[in-house]
Structures are given as structure tokens and as C-alpha cells.
Image: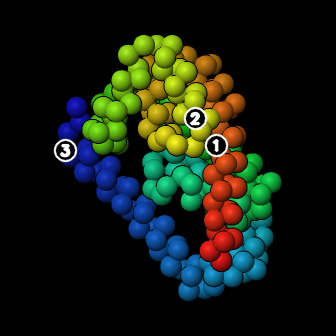
């Protein structure tokens, strides 16, 4: 079990990240970067490859320290870089973050789950780990379909006996469908609202 001080520190880091994202959004709105697609594309183009790299790193960090819902990042990738490159940057960032989350959980163990996630989520999905092969199948299905808390499941997988090879194969092979579905669905929704 984690100590209250650790939970408070982690929540403070998450809140700080959220506030920084909010401030960036306010800046983007006030400067017109978030209200004009032309200005947004011009801003991203002015950053060159640094913009793509920063976005990819943001997506990776987003898995390890969830600040915003992952779907918003997928939408941002498509809006910033178009459907092709947006998908690539989303995929690379999310897969890198998923591998990092697995590594962190592998090293820190189950107490980390209690620090990062609600008890309700832990109880609900921990039942999946009671049978080794069952967890791998359910994990792969959950990663393939964009319906489960992927960030949590990546951490949970790191606390199981799942091998790095199997985990990596599941992430690399199953993530593209979910990312494409999120990106396409949210893009269509965004266009309908705009």
C-alpha cells in the first residue's frame, strides 16, 4: 500500500501537468492558434521537426503520467499533423509510453498501482490476472479495442509474469487499430462540431 504523502505528491504532479496544459490551451486560444486551423498549422510548421518530436514525447508521457484523456491526444495528433503523420506520431508516442509504463510497473510492483489509480479500477481489472493465459488474451483484446483503461492495463501487465516479448508484441500489433479508431472517430466528431 502506498503512503498518503506519496499519493499527495503524485496528485500534485498530475495537477501541475493539468494546469500547464490548461495554461497552454488558454495561450493557444488567446493567440488564435487553437481557434484557427490555418494559424495552428502555421504554428506547428514553424516548429519543424521539434514540434513532431515534442508531440510524440507528450504522447509517451501521457501514458506514464495521465494528464488528459488519451483520446484528446489522438485528436490533437490528427489536427496538428494530418491523418497520416498524426497517426504515426500518436502510434510511436503511445507505444513508447506503454513500454515505459510496463517497465516502471515491473520495477515498482503492485504498490504503484495504488498510488496511480483508484481502488475501484484496481479491483475490477486485477481479477483478470488470476489466470496467466487469461490475462494475456484479455489484455490483447482490451488494447485492440478502444474501450478499456489502457494506461492502467499497461501498468497492471507490468506487475504480472507476462514476458517483455509478449507484452511488446501485443502493444505493437494491437495498438494501431485502437489509435486509428480514436483518431478517425474523434476527427469526425470534431468536424461535425466545427
Name the residue at 69% across, 40% down.
177
Report the disc number at residue 178. Answer: 1
Q: Which residue is mark 3?
A: 4
- Check the picture and name the quadrant holding the C terminus: bottom right
Report the disc number at residue 38. Answer: none
Mark 2 or mark 1, earlier in chain: 2
Distance from the alpha carbon under mark 2 to that under mark 3: 31 Å
Mark 1 or mark 3, earlier in chain: 3
- Check the picture and name the quadrant holding the N terminus: top left
Residue 111 appearing in the image:
yes
Residue 96 appearing in the image:
no
Q: In x, y percent, where is residue 11?
A: 31, 53
Q: Which residue is mark 2?
A: 143
- Which is more foreground, mark 2 or mark 3? 2
Q: Secondary structure at mark 3?
A: helix
User: Mark 2 and 1 residues: CB-CB less than 8 Å, in contact?
Assistant: yes
Name the residue at 49% across, 40% down.
148
Along the viewing direction, whichever of 148 and 162 lies nearer the viewer:
148
Q: Is residue 139 left or right of residue 57?
A: left
Name the residue at 64% across, 43% down.
178
**Mark 2 crowd level (few <14, some 14–19, many ≥20, 10 Å Cα):** many
Name the residue at 41% across, 23% down.
128
Distance from the alpha carbon under mark 2 to that under mark 1: 7 Å
Q: How is the image coloured?
A: rainbow
Amino acid at each position: 500500500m502506498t503512503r498518503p504523502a506519496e499519493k499527495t505528491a503524485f496528485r500534485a504532479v498530475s495537477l501541475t501537468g493539468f494546469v500547464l496544459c490548461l495554461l497552454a490551451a488558454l495561450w493557444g486560444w488567446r493567440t488564435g492558434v487553437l481557434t484557427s486551423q490555418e494559424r495552428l498549422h502555421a504554428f506547428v510548421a514553424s516548429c519543424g521537426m521539434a514540434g513532431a518530436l515534442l508531440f510524440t514525447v507528450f504522447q509517451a508521457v501521457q501514458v506514464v503520467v495521465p494528464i488528459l484523456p488519451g483520446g484528446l491526444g489522438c485528436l490533437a495528433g490528427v489536427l496538428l499533423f494530418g491523418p497520416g503523420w498524426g497517426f504515426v506520431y500518436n502510434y510511436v508516442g503511445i507505444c513508447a509510453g506503454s513500454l515505459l509504463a510496463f517497465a516502471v510497473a515491473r520495477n515498482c510492483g503492485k504498490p504503484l498501482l495504488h498510488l496511480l489509480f483508484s481502488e475501484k479500477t484496481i479491483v475490477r481489472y486485477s481479477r483478470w490476472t488470476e489466470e496467466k493465459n487469461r490475462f494475456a488474451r484479455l489484455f490483447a483484446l482490451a488494447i485492440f479495442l478502444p474501450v478499456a483503461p489502457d494506461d492502467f492495463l499497461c501498468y497492471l501487465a507490468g506487475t504480472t509474469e507476462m514476458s517483455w516479448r509478449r507484452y511488446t508484441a501485443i502493444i505493437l500489433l494491437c495498438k494501431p487499430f485502437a489509435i486509428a479508431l480514436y483518431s478517425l472517430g474523434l476527427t469526425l466528431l470534431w468536424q461535425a462540431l466545427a
